[in-house]
Amino acid sequence: MKRFLAIFVLLLAFATVNVQSAKALSLFDLNIQKCDKFDLVWYDRGSGAERDGAFYRPVPTPGFFVVGDYGQGNYGQPNGDVLCFNPLKKSALANPIDFALIWKDTGSGAHRDGSFWRPIPPQGYSCIGDVVQEGYAKPYRPDYKCLHNDLISPWSPEQTSFVWNDRGSGADADVSVYSVPFSKVIHVQGNYSPPHGPIYDLNLNSF
């Protein structure tokens, strides 16, 4: 009987561990911080585009990570902010496994070469923001993180805000840039169409 009880206790403990490990993550598993310090990466000055656009890399507090870059439709000092994250559980954030090119400014005549890239997440994660790069080389971004799927949800493309497009630049390809609704990082698409999904941002119901 004692042996049976011991086995039962072990099985119960094992089941409890499995239930706890399978528990969904929530936004309580992240420290979230607004970041309003940026380094300029690329602007379209000289491109001939009808609109001005400048794109920046967030500079977060040590220990925090970025989930996308920032853009604005002028050449002035950056006047917005984006969200940056510090994981309280290691599984909340993960590194992208690669970056896929969305657009490069070849043919535009801009004073500086620039490109936009989409991070590719590992299984179980999603990337909510895109990356700007000076030049055309694939980014190396150890500070960039993808968010666990428990922490995000789809948002309507109509909730994004327009930032810039290169219409009139003469670049070999088209591009439009939007900011996602809550985290305010950039979402880039290789056309002039209205924003379309999938658009991901924080799941505000996961508290």
Image (cartoon, helix red, strand yellow):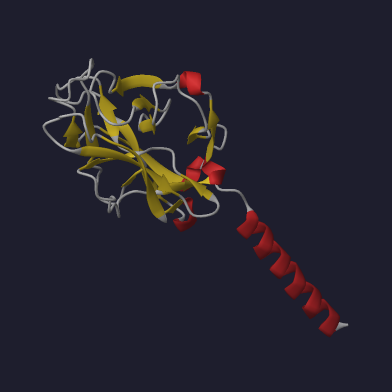
Rendered location of residue 19, percent (x, y):
68, 58
Residue 95 visible (yes or no): no
In screen coordinates, is 77 left or right of 181? Answer: left
Q: Nearer the viewer, residue 33 or 71?
A: 71
Vertical arrangement, residue 86 with respect to residue 177, above or below: below
> Is the C terminus in the top left, top right, bottom left or bottom right quadrant?
top right
Q: Nearer the viewer, residue 91 or 19?
A: 91
Vertical arrangement, residue 165 with respect to residue 154, above or below: above
Vertical arrangement, residue 52 with respect to residue 171, above or below: above
Residue 109 visible (yes or no): yes
Residue at image x 39%, y 54%?
Answer: 98
Rendered location of residue 84, percent (x, y):
34, 40
In screen coordinates, is 44 left or right of 93? Answer: left
> Is the N terminus in the top left, top right, bottom left or bottom right quadrant?
bottom right
Residue at image x 23%, y 22%?
Answer: 169
Residue at image x 37%, y 32%?
Answer: 188
Number of numbered labels in the structure image: 0
Q: Quadrant of residue 136?
A: top left
Rendered location of residue 115, percent (x, y):
26, 39
